[in-house]
Image (spheres, rainbow, N blue to C red):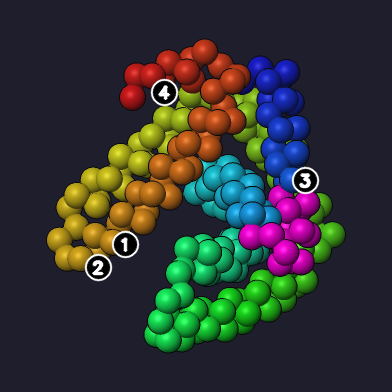
Amino acid sequence: MNQRNAEKLKYELLETWNTFNHYMTEALTFQNSEDIHQARVHLRKLLTFMQLYDTKPSTYRQLKQLMEALGAVRDEDVLLEGLTVETDLDQAFSDHIEALRAKDRTLLTSRVTEKMTPSLDQQVRRFIGGQLFRAFRKHDAASFLEKANIERKRRIKAHQEATNMSARLETLHKVRLAVKRERYLNEYLLNYEAKARKIKFKN
């Protein structure tokens, strides 16, 4: 990737990090479930680029723990928003999920307080502006997309070969995550190189 495109992609990812921080701050007010969703989406996009490396950057584990905490609250938000309470049993189930969500909201707040430090912010910015930026300059966009494409196909093959229900559910979840990672890479990278666009259309 040429210098100009690498610079543009670097700033696009720094803006993704800034947007995540904005939604994460709003999410902790628990006034709008969309803030949780958007924080999760933007964080997953950053994790997608970290997952390109066999040896993950030092911040990966901390961000993954934030993702897990966001995911628990998001799942409960969606469940409650789609729940129609018509019977006493429905109400009991709703109350149970509400209690779980209250607990997970507390955990999320604690995780953010513990993990979202100035040090983490600096490390993420250094990763985007350093290690990742150098990788963009060294490799073309097509190579990143090809790696994600191979990973998706590997996950699909593992799902097709799974025999019991538990394994099929687990491998299906991994297929879903691989598809999301490939989609996010496409979203960021396809604007920068015609060669990368050809890979997308070929597959």
Is 48 situated left or right of 124 in this image?
left
- Residue shown at 49%/20% (left/top)? 196
Between 69 and 50, the residue placed more toward the observer is: 69
Q: Can I make out residue 152 in this image?
A: yes
Q: Earlier in the sequence, mark 3 or mark 2?
A: 3
Instruction: Work out how far the residue at label 2 is from the one at label 4, CA to CA, in angstroms.
Output: 32 Å
Q: Which residue is mark 2?
A: 166
Give the number of the disc on residue 17: none
In this view, which residue lies farthest toward the top? Answer: 194
Q: Residues within 10 Å of mark 3 (few under 14, many from 20)?
A: some
Instruction: Work out how far the residue at label 3 is from the one at label 2, CA to CA, in angstroms.
Output: 38 Å
Instruction: Work out how far the residue at label 3 is from the one at label 1, CA to CA, in angstroms.
Output: 32 Å
Q: Position of residue 162 (x, y in %)?
A: 19, 57
Say what secondary structure mark 1 lies in: helix
Q: In the displayed structure, would residue 66 be above or below residue 146?
A: below
Q: Which residue is mark 3?
A: 18
Q: Are marks 2 and 1 in contact (CB under 8 Å)?
A: yes
Query: Magenta residues?
Result: 20-33
Query: Quarter of the image containing the C terminus?
Result: top left
Instruction: Work out how far the residue at label 1 is from the one at label 4, CA to CA, in angstroms.
Output: 27 Å
